[in-house]
Structure formats: structure tokens, C-alpha cells
Amino acid sequence: MTTSFTLARNAFDHLVLTTLDGQVHENVSPVRAFPIQSPDEGISLVLQDGQEVVWIDRLADLPESSRALIAAELAGREFMPEIEQIESVSSYATPCTWQVKTDRGETAFVLKGEEDMRRIGPSSILISDNHGIQFLIRDMYAIDKHSRKILDRFL
């Protein structure tokens, strides 16, 4: 696989991008264009001032070493647990406490108001808790019946 750049980490553990013509860009950061709908497509490598250095159409097109570095960098910067099951809610009026199972374990959070739940696309929902942490329900139609029933009360 041929790419127009190479990626490595420097002594400070920052990403360093080197173009084929020898230009070196220190401390680049990956930014997803579509983090929920297409997380592995449309990724920009930007400098600290936000200037784009490289556009990546698809992560899968990169060599494994570059793909792993970008994935590790994104994982360290992004935190969005994915809700797999809603176990219970303290009330159907807000504010209320939700007990959920996520891809990162069980947790509880407070939903301040129904305005903190947003539909994203036809089946995804983004929920912000009282601390600003965002939880994702990737496909509200694919979760279990009990969780779907609770969601229906809030949507």
C-alpha cells in the first residue's frame, strides 16, 4: 500500500507526519469528519493551529502501522461510551438517573432534560449527561425490547 506520508511518534509521544517530499510536521492530530455515521472514513490530520496537512478517505487504505497510530490517538482523545442496554430510569420526568450497560461497562448518569437527547440520522441517538459526557445509541431499533420501551417514553 502506498501513501503520500509516513507517521511515527517522537520522544514526547506526539504524532509526526513526514510527507514523501521530506516535509516534517510535528504534533499532528487526527480529526474525524463524521465520528458517528462513518468513523473510519473522512479523517483529517491537522496541525495544532487546525491547518489540515493530510486528508484520509478511508482508514482501511492505510498501512497497518499508520492505521494503528491514528486509532490509538483517536481513542485517547475521544470518549463516547455506546449504550448497549438501558437497565432502568429513576423517573420518566427529568431530571432522572439512568442505569445503563455500555461497551465500557455499567454506569449511571443523570439526564437533565429531554433536550439532552438528540437523534442523529435515522436510528442513532446521542445523549448528554449532566457532566457533558456523551453516550451513543448506535441503532435504537437493534437494542432489546425493554430498553426500546424506555427510549420511546423520552423520544
Image (cartoon, helix red, strand yellow):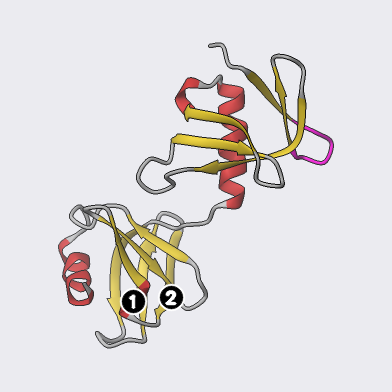
For this rendering, which residue is in front, 101 or 36? Answer: 36
Amino acid type, label 1 = Glu
* SS at circle 1: helix
Labels 1 and 2 touching (C-beta < 8 A): no
For this rendering, which residue is in front, 30 or 71? Answer: 30
For this rendering, which residue is in front, 94 or 25? Answer: 25
The C terminus, quarter of image: bottom left
Q: Is residue 118 left or right of residue 39?
A: left
Q: What residue sits 51% from the left and 29% below the top?
A: 56
**Number of the label disc, if any, that sits on residue 115:** 1
| Residue 103 lies in the magenta stretch | no
Above or below, comparing residue 53 to residue 63 in the picture: below
Closer to viewer: mark 1 or mark 2: 1
User: Which residue is under mark 2?
Assistant: 109
| Residue sitting farthest toward the right | 11
Per the picture, the main secondary structure of the magenta-coloured stretch is loop
Q: What residue sits 80% from the left and 33% below the top?
A: 10
Q: Is residue 71 left or right of residue 130?
A: right
**First to last magenta residue range:** 9-14
Residue 59 at x, y percent in the picture = 48, 29
